[in-house]
Amino acid sequence: MVSGPPPRTVDWAILVVLVLQAATGVGTLFAGTPDSAWLIVLHAIGGLVLVGLIGMKLWRVRNRLRPGRFRREMVPAVLAAVVVLATMGTGIAWASGWRPWVGLWTLLTIHAVLGLLLLFPVLVHLSLRIHRPRVVDFAERRTALQFAALAGVGTIAWGLQRQLTRLLEAPSRFTGSYQTRSFEGNAFPSTSWVADDPEPIDPGDWELIVDGAVEHDVAISESNLTANGETEVDLTTDGGAEAALRSNAEIDAVLDCTSGWFSEQRWQGVSVASLLDAATPTDEARWVAFHSVTGYRWSLPIDEAADALLATHVTGERLSHDHGYPLRLVAPGRRGFQWVKWVERVEVRTAADYGQWIAIFTSGFE
Ligand code: HEM
Ligand SMILES: Nc1nc2c(c(=O)[nH]1)N[C@H]1C(S)=C(S)[C@@H](COP(=O)(O)O)O[C@H]1N2
Ligand SMILES: [Mo]
């Protein structure tokens, strides 16, 4: 019988691929434009190569898994094995075109959560069992060839799988997301990142404020926002003087949620550039933060913000409450979680907003 690569080499390769999977997996959450497609391809091929590595490892230790030989120190190893199989299984099922929702979660979300949980049993198992690698473990010509062959098989498997999803008519975008209800107005799914679920907003109680590192604050009421398809901007610091601003904008852009679906829509509303023009950023202005009534917020570098839109309409329909009425951010090339809904404040900033990383997890909790 042919023998595989040496055990310690397989173990180290597993560790390297796992670290790579965790890093590229988290990276996919930010991959919004095709120039980051390589990250997802790397993740997919790495994941398929891991199947081969885990297969070798489980084959090697199969005798130790018999009931009579079970010891307590093996618990982290067994847990790690179960979770890695579940992570690979959910990843492959999703990428092959099986995309069920399990309650509020998609299979892809479950995959990501399992992938992150996996790090715990793996770290414990490692701390109990670690053997230091030696260069010679990898330097063997035969071992190097075996790994190259494994990478080749992984790449071929990935290519075949892409064909399979085409046959099943379940192709995905480069992010791994599938298309749903494009250009059908409010019909596409709506989702909250964690707990945001505000009461519907009464337009009479709402206004949009632009403030921060600007020459003058701006306030816009809901009726001015939508009047005549134009936007009248009220420069509040100028004693209420009203400046009519032609700021109606329209763009086609893809909302791509990290839970694995996307929808392309024609978004209509107020261009952020026109709001910035009205408020006039100071020389120190660098970032623009978009605040939701719920406390959720996200920011964009000021140049990128100028290309974004605060949408009132989605493919011809006034935004529904679920999709962020009266106003939601449309940030082309960014992932869905950055498209803040129910926006009430545009804050021009001189510095990055690190607090947003906490706000997106905690907003909506009382
Ligand atoms: C270390 C843990 C992880 C492992 C072992 C792993 C493994 C895999 C595997 C085997 C696939 C299927 C590849 C294919 O069949 O083409 C996959 C797909 C995927 N994984 Fe992971 N993954 C991990 C963590 C994550 C995390 C943390 C995320 C996101 C936060 C993530 C996001 C994705 C996405 C978006 C896909 C779909 C790619 C596509 O449809 O082309 N993964 N993963
Ligand atoms: N205020 C607020 N905005 C939010 C969210 C949220 O939970 N709260 N969820 C984000 C996420 S994760 C996505 S994918 C999109 C979903 O937009 P939709 O509900 O209109 O489909 O909104 C984003 N904007
Ligand atoms: Mo999302």
Image (cartoon, helix red, strand yellow):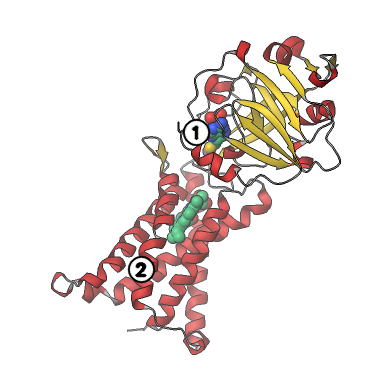
Q: Is residue 189 left or right of residue 3?
A: right
Q: Is residue 77 visible?
A: yes
Amino acid residing under circle 2: Val
Using the numbered discs, state the Cα–Cα distance from disc 2 to disc 1 in whole angstroms: 33 Å
Looking at marks 2 and 1 on the same chain, the residue that comes earlier in the sequence is marked by 2
Q: Mark 1 — residue?
A: 192
Locate residue 156, reporting x and y percent. Answer: 51, 63
In this rendering, position of residue 55 left or right of residue 323: left
Q: Quadrant of the C terminus?
A: top left
Q: Find out if the beta carbon at label 1 lies less than 8 Å from the nearest ligand 2 atom.
A: yes
Number of disc labels = 2
Residue 188: where, in percent of width, then height?
Answer: 53, 27
Q: Position of residue 34 (x, y in %)?
A: 66, 49
Q: Which residue is mark 2?
A: 124
Q: Residue at x 37, y 81 (%)?
A: 7
Q: Is residue 106 above or below residue 232?
A: below
Residue 89 in the image: above or below residue 81? above
Q: Quadrant of ligand 2?
A: top right
93 or 223, which is in the foreground?
223
Vertical comparison of 26 with 58: above or below: above
Q: Looking at numbered disc 1 in the image, what kind of residue is underneath it?
A: Ser
Q: Quadrant of the N terminus?
A: bottom left
